[in-house]
Image: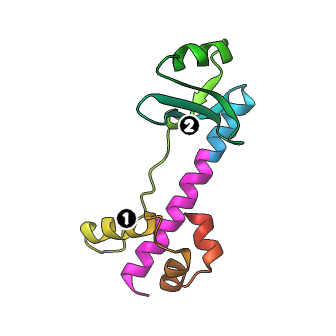
Amino acid sequence: MDLVQEYVRRYLVAQREAERSLAEAIEKLEASGHRIIDGGQTGQTTWQYTDWHTGEILASGDDRTSDDAALRALDPDEAFLHIDDIARQPAEPENPGIPQSLATALEDWVDLLTTPDEDIARFVGWTPQDVAAAR
């Protein structure tokens, strides 16, 4: 097998494992009573926070309202955790022997939202569904 194809496969597997690890960490945090939220600044003067799982809007406002005060009122027990504050494992596959600069370019290609799953699937010999699950 081509080393470039092998690297892309390894990167996809590493991404899937990193996402699985993140899901397990979130599950443990939620089991201990935390709620995972997402959001923050949405414009120059607006902000919004949502439930990370459901997308439910928990609080929103503009520069006339304090997002910190709104979150404190919603979360007096400080159980909310922002998804960005949960440590993510980087996807770091073993390199089969290609230059690191090429590996980085391949990772960028896989990570681009404009790269279709079908293109990656054809390249590595997977189904588009398997690629989508790994990305």
What residue does disc 2 label? 83
Residue at 58%, 53% (x, y): give it.
19
The range drawn in magenta is: 1-22
Q: Three-letter amino acid code at disc 1? A: Asp
Can you say which quadrant of the picture contains the N terminus?
bottom left
Give above or below for 12 relative to 6. Answer: above
Give above or below for 119 relative to 131. Answer: below
Camera-side residue of 24 and 76: 76
- Tell me if mark 2 has few (under 14), some (14-19) or many (20+) residues whose alpha carbon lies within 10 angstroms of its own: some
Residues under numbered marks 1 and 2 in contact, where contact means CB atoms less than 8 Å apart: no
Horizontal side of 25 relative to 103 (left or right) equals: right
Horizontal side of 77 relative to 7 (left or right) equals: right
Residue at 50%, 61% (x, y): give it.
14
Residue at 68%, 29% (x, y): give it.
35
Name the image quarter holding residue 98: bottom left
What residue does disc 1 label? 108
Q: Tell me where residue 135 appears, x and y as whole percent.
A: 54, 63
Q: Main secondary structure of the magenta part?
A: helix
Comes first in the chain, label 1 or label 2: 2
Q: Secondary structure at mark 2?
A: helix
Q: Secondary structure at mark 1?
A: helix
Q: Three-letter amino acid code at disc 2? A: Ile
Q: Tell me where residue 73 appears, x and y as whole percent.
A: 65, 13
Horizontal side of 131 relative to 102 (left or right) equals: right
The answer to whether any part of residue 75 appears in the image is no
Give above or below for 5 relative to 13. Answer: below
Residue at 57%, 60% (x, y): give it.
16
Q: Tell me where residue 23 appears, x and y as whole percent.
A: 64, 46
